[in-house]
Amino acid sequence: MSILVRRSVFQLRTVNRCRKIKVTTQSARNGSQLSYKTPLNESLSKELRHFHTSHAVNKIVAFKLSDIGEGIREVVIKEWFVKVGDNVQQFDNICEVQSDKAAVTITSRYDGIITRLYHDIDQTALVGQPLVDIDVQDSENDGKPTDVAPDKPVAEIDAPKTEQNQKIKVLTTPAVRRIAAQFKVDLSAVKATGRNGRVLKEDMLSHLNINSDDSNEVVLPGSVRAVEIPVTKAQARVELALEDKVVPVTGFQRAMVKSMTEAMKIPHFVFSDEYNVTKLVESRAALKKQAEERGVRLTYMPIIIKAASLSLSYLPILNSSLDSSCENLIYKASHNIGVAMDTPNGLVVPVIKNIQIKSILEIAQELNTLQEKGSKGQLGLNDLTGGTFTISNIGIVGGTYTKPVIFPPQVAIGALGKIQVLPRFDSQGNVVKAHILSVSWSADHRVIDGVTMARFSNHLKNYLEDPYILLLDL
Amino acid sequence: MAQAMVKRIVSSSACTFAGLAQKTYIRNVAASSKVAASKKERVLPTEGEITKSVFMSQSTDIYTNLALEDWLYKNMDFTNHHVMMVWRNEPCVVIGRHQNPWLEANVPLLSEKEIALARRNSGGGTVYHDRGNLNITFFAPRERYDRNYNLKLIKRALFRSFGIKSTINERQDLIVRDKYKVSGTAAKLGRLTGYHHCTLLVNANKADLSKALAKRETKATASTRSEVANLKDLDNRITVENLQTALGYEYLRTPALHLDDGGQSLIAKQRGFQFVNPTDDWFPGLAELKNDLVSWDWCFGRTPMFTVSRSFPVPIGLLAPSKVYSATQELVINMTVEKGLINDVTLSIPPGLIESGFHGEASVITHLKGKRFTSEALNALQDAMLTRHHVSDVKELDDKEQFVAKCFDQVVNTM
């Protein structure tokens, strides 16, 4: 027993003296190296089995489909259990393939991160050809028996701080443990979202209230995005900003990818104008007080929405929907206007239904409810579907003229810019202070022409520049 | 010395971490043979060291039996111990892992006749089970998986005990009289273990069989239809019970790795027949496996994505009167179903129907999305259409809405 211990101690010492352990970052590969301090004796007495005796490397290995047997040359991929970016351990399930009547579960030979899947579901894979690419963080243990149960944590030589956590056995990578040690974070307190309860780097970062790098995201026109200011410590910033981050596109973002791709098949045209809303601003101040007495928070949006609905009654073609084969134009009876909102989950467009029969106060109430639900992520399918027209208020963040993207199967969308105070000439030729609201309307040029859009915009302009006119049509 | 030490450390920790069945003889069997499970170090025993058992399941519930099969596959070590399990079930339809139940079986008929529908873990096509059908599962370590050996063993048993001559065709089915299929086969291979299971039609109800299995060809793993026959038609003496025994003895008297007759002496060296009662006490974790297999999400939700498209001509009575239409007015319904839930619905409403006053499209699409592809969706749809009548007080659907609802009904129920 003692011989064994001594031998392993010796090997560990040589590991640490002769090599610096490389962290898997691109910069690390370029030369800057970080080394660990290892209290050998303490870690050894607790974790006798876990040690790496080989040189730490960082390379992408193509995991080939091994021979299934029975002379089978090719199989069909039926299910993937991993996706790009997932952390896998040796013996984790990678995918399920099918060859005539046998369903075979392929397990991983390596530990690492998946960087590429070679086939889609229902595609044929050949035996001997690569199946996935795995970014191997440490090369395989050679010869020494690893522990039996395949989902034990990969061996680390820990900084002294996290030793206390070893009793709870939190699954993480060395990089995350280093950050934890640096900020003196208890790993078990960090919410883990990885597979099998792994604490991913993103979890650590969000725990520390550091935001992920979104330099690669494309900001779409008309989308409202609140930019968060990262709260970080200076040191963390330097180390963390050096890495590319692969964030899978899921959930809301994925839905947006899908719908925007669809939307760009529509030929858009944009009609922009500016409305002098000085009188609206004055009236809102008075109306707001009244509304508050009734327990409703009134902003410009409900008034604008109602005015838009009245204008839609004059030009119902803007409240229609073109079916996918472009054979039929369905004029929708109800004005279900969607209001684009920025929520913690991303851009969502909840819909207020049947505006044509609702009053401004009712619209305001509903808008408040939807905003609350949206901020909590509680918007249901009912709230999000059935829209016939959309208005996006990017002005609360900023901007003037934009080119909003239509939300299929609708045919038009509007984007309201900021209300700016600018000098304008009045009817007598004097320079006066005016509140100017810039708007941009996008429409589907296959069914809407410029004149229609212009007429609609003028109608709305009429209502908003002189809110008293609303009385006539309400 | 050091090697032995290491092995002992590893195996002792293996036993504490293995977490297998605590109560039964199975634990002794499994834990004692779980030594150094790292793939590279796995040493397979020689033929003489392998013993065999025949497990006979006491349950006739398809889900319990599938769960038991799964439990053994996941938790038992077959390195030194090969097992053949025989089981049979109350009437049910079993589809392959990646198949589409709506296209393989007549789903409304199954619920009507209370025939269970289950999805197994292995691939292959759809089969109908009843008490006249015997199921056999051969368990072996992955490296020793040999489908041919198993089928030939069955062939030998049939001949030895009943004089029935059979052949194995290229699709690995057992054929009698050169054209009738009596057995279907499927397999599942994992890292350490592989199992091969097959059916044997002894005295199954062929009429029920053809009614339960729909006649369509499918996109998701297609079933290949063949003409079937019962073994009882070939030899009157054969019953499920004595076939079970015959197969069991044949299995035990054949050496593990090659086909030969070891006779009674070899049978004496094996572990013999075992009645197995699949309960959670004997197999901890079995109840959970069974619950997963019973769940709607597994049976129906695991279907690969598919689309359905049907067009229905609109009856003249529903179109706006006194209008002449150039083409036949057709209502086209396209539905994509993902994970058993209706994902996307596109309605193509002909102008004739819009002009005669049908306005329900929005509610149709909103209310169907996310619903299961069953009558549940239709009920939701009808409710939705009814609530649209909140303006007027009519509590019934008008005939146009009824027509649309009926069309949806047809799409879902008559696949």
Image (tube, grey):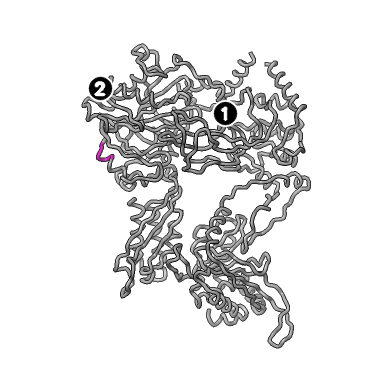
Q: Position of residue A103 (x, y in %)?
A: 44, 35
| Residue A11 belongs to the span the image colors magenta | no
- Pick the quarter of the image with the N terminus of chain B: top right
**Vertical position of residue A401 compared to residue B21: above or below:** below
Q: Residues within 10 Å of mark 1 (few under 14, many from 20)?
A: some
**Vertical position of residue B247 compared to residue A437: above or below:** above
Amino acid of disc 1: Ala
Labels 2, 1: front one:
2
Secondary structure of the residue carrying tag 2 is helix
Q: Chain of mark 2?
A: B
Secondary structure of the residue carrying tag 1 is loop
* Residue A237 vs residue A412, the one in the foreground: A412
Badge number at residue B85: none
Residue named by callout 1 = A149
Q: Position of residue B412 (x, y in %)?
A: 36, 53
| Separation of marks 2 and 1 at Cα, in angstroms | 47 Å
Amino acid of disc 2: Phe
As drawn, is A247 to the left or to the right of A387?
right
The residue stretch that appears in magenta: B205-209
**Vertical position of residue B310 compared to residue B388: above or below:** above
Q: Position of residue A310 (x, y in %)?
A: 53, 76
Examine the image and state in which quarter residue B400 appears: bottom left
Residue named by callout 2 = B162
Q: Position of residue B331 (x, y in %)?
A: 36, 62
The reply to whether residue A121 is in sight is yes
Q: Chain of mark 1?
A: A
